[in-house]
Amino acid sequence: MSLPEIALALLAAVAIVTAASALLVRELVHTILWIGIFFVDLAAIYFLLEAPFLGVLQLGVYAGAVTVLLLFGIMVTRKRIFSREAATGIGVAPLALAALTVVVLATALDELPSGNVPIQAYPPTALSTDLFGAHGPWLLLLGLVMLVSVSGAIWLVREGRE
Amino acid sequence: MTALPLGGFLALSSALLGVGLFGILTRRNFVLLLIAIEIAMNAAILNFVYFAAFAPVPALGLTGQEIAVVLIGFAATEVAVGLAIVLALHRLRGSINVAQATDLNG
């Protein structure tokens, strides 16, 4: 195995373990810690795929902003930040459905070309030129939709107070 | 040039989608539900980045990365809206257990 393949195997294992741990631990603050590690791990996978802009974006938006927002959500809805979530059963049916989804998707892997495929690297300048050049107006429209969504969220939080 | 197996990446995103789906179906705490949705969404974003990296035509690869950029922005917005709902739910019912939020039931 080459070094990138070993790195991929390690990062993939860490991603699955941290994602599962985030949902299975009972201490909610530990959930946030696990999900933070998960987001950092995905950023490392983006760097491995030679997409540095996406890696930095993942670190800033997910590992930074989203993790802090989720921590904030726990802090304001709990009397004590280190409080345990009531135990919920694993559930055979949801577990079977999730496993079935993975199995069905895994069967499609046989159709893929076997062996290693070379990775195409794109410099961040090419990405930004294409994103803000050809797709600029659509990006602005999407930004407007996001602004309206966040404004709606602020309105939702303020409304109950009055 | 680095070369990696495409199947390995897709197996990873399938497993992450499975974990996210399991969380969505079993968790009752709204914050945990949001986290499960984020895990499933990250599996989808990962797919766009893989196919961008393995695309034979540069224009297709760039488009894949652009969609990933937009999706990361959308996911952050989704968390903001989700947390606003968490706060509203907590103020209304004193709990963020989604099983108890049945006000819209007919």
Image (spheres, rainbow, N blue to C red):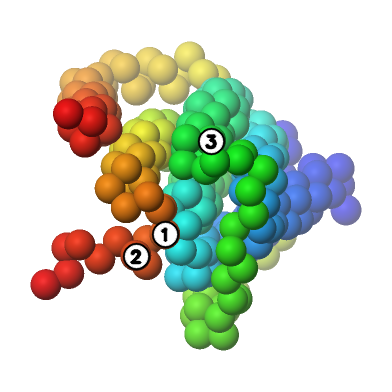
Tell me how far mark 1 sits from mark 2, CA to CA: 6 Å
Marks 1 and 2 in Cβ contact (< 8 Å): yes
Q: A138 above or below B92?
A: above
Residue position for label 1: B97
Q: Residue at x 53, y 74 (%)?
A: A98
The answer to which image quadrant residue A146 occupies is top left
Residue position for label 2: B100
Would you call the spot at circle 3 few (<14 residues within 10 Å), some (14-19), or many (20 or more)? some
Q: Amino acid at mark 2?
A: Gln
Q: Secondary structure at mark 2?
A: helix
Q: Secondary structure at mark 3?
A: helix
Q: Amino acid at mark 1?
A: Asn
Q: Chain of mark 3?
A: A
Q: Residue at x 41, y 34 (%)?
A: B76
The answer to which image quadrant residue A26 occupies is bottom right
Check chain identity for marks 1 and 2: say if they share one: yes
Q: A122 above or below A75?
A: above
Q: Chain of mark 2?
A: B
